[in-house]
Amino acid sequence: MSPRLRVAASGLAFAALLAGSAAAEEAWVRGAPLNLRAGAGVEQPVLGSVAPGERLEVLASSGEWARVRRADGSGGWIAASYLAREIPPAARISELEAETERLRQQLDAAGTQAAELRQRSDAEARTGAELEAELQRARRESDALRAGARWPEWIAGALILSTGMALGALLRGVSGRRRQTRLKL
């Protein structure tokens, strides 16, 4: 066989494998343990057995027989009437228990996250309240300044100025210098 022909054959085999696995569906064995056969029919040799409730992948159907693949990758043919398309209750219970546990973990994680967010929100609310109080204090101060609350400062300045003027007048009179009435140029 030429290399090109080998590559083409392997490509077709790979494509058929992918198409087969894409079209495969799940089924579960019901009833008693069943023989897994090499072909479709009771005259075909037995390859092994499958237990009730075992999950199989149905790859193809031929009349009353179905070609299946087990979880370990082995496969064969089995009577299609012993396959159930719905998950058996025992397997469904274990799936639901696993899902319940996963949901409990998510709920616990969400509760923890909610508590953390609540704490952060409380801290930010306290900070917001402190900032609001500071803003109110600054507004009161600003309103007081606008309303003329600076009059004590004005009075103190006027007193200092008048005291300075009075002292200046007193010191001038005490200095003994004569006042000149004329201006000299």
Image (cartoon, rainbow, N blue to C red):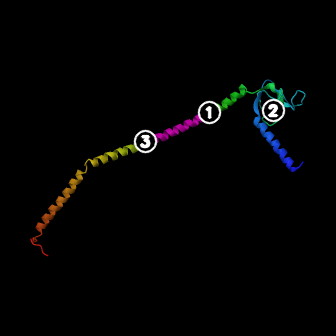
Mark whose residue sits in front, 2 or 3: 2
Q: In percent of the image, x 23 and y 51: which residue is there?
A: 151
Magenta region: 106-123
Q: In percent of the image, x 42 and y 43: which residue is there?
A: 128
Q: Are marks 1 and 3 in contact (CB under 8 Å)?
A: no
Tag shown at residue 178:
none
State the residue in front, 175 or 64: 64
Tag shown at residue 60:
2
Tag shown at residue 126:
3
CA–CA distance in space, label 2 to label 1: 36 Å
Q: Are marks 2 and 3 in contact (CB under 8 Å)?
A: no
Q: Earlier in the sequence, mark 1 or mark 3?
A: 1
Secondary element at image label 1: helix
Give how far across and how far down residue 84 sits, in percent: 76, 26
Mark 2 neighbour density, 10 Å: few (under 14) some (14–19) many (20 or more): some
Numbered-mark total: 3
Give how far across and how far down residue 11 sits, in percent: 81, 45
CA–CA distance in space, label 1 to label 3: 34 Å
* Residue wearing tag 1: 103
Q: Is residue 7 above or below residue 102?
A: below
Q: Are marks 2 and 1 in contact (CB under 8 Å)?
A: no
Q: In percent of the image, x 11 and y 66: which residue is there?
A: 173
Q: Earlier in the sequence, mark 2 or mark 3?
A: 2
Give how far across and how far down residue 86 sits, in percent: 73, 27
The kind of residue on which mark 2 rests is Ala
State the residue in front, 8 or 143: 8
Q: Earlier in the sequence, mark 2 or mark 1?
A: 2
For residue 32, which quarter of the picture?
top right
The kind of residue on which mark 1 rests is Leu
CA–CA distance in space, label 2 to label 3: 67 Å
The kind of residue on which mark 3 rests is Arg
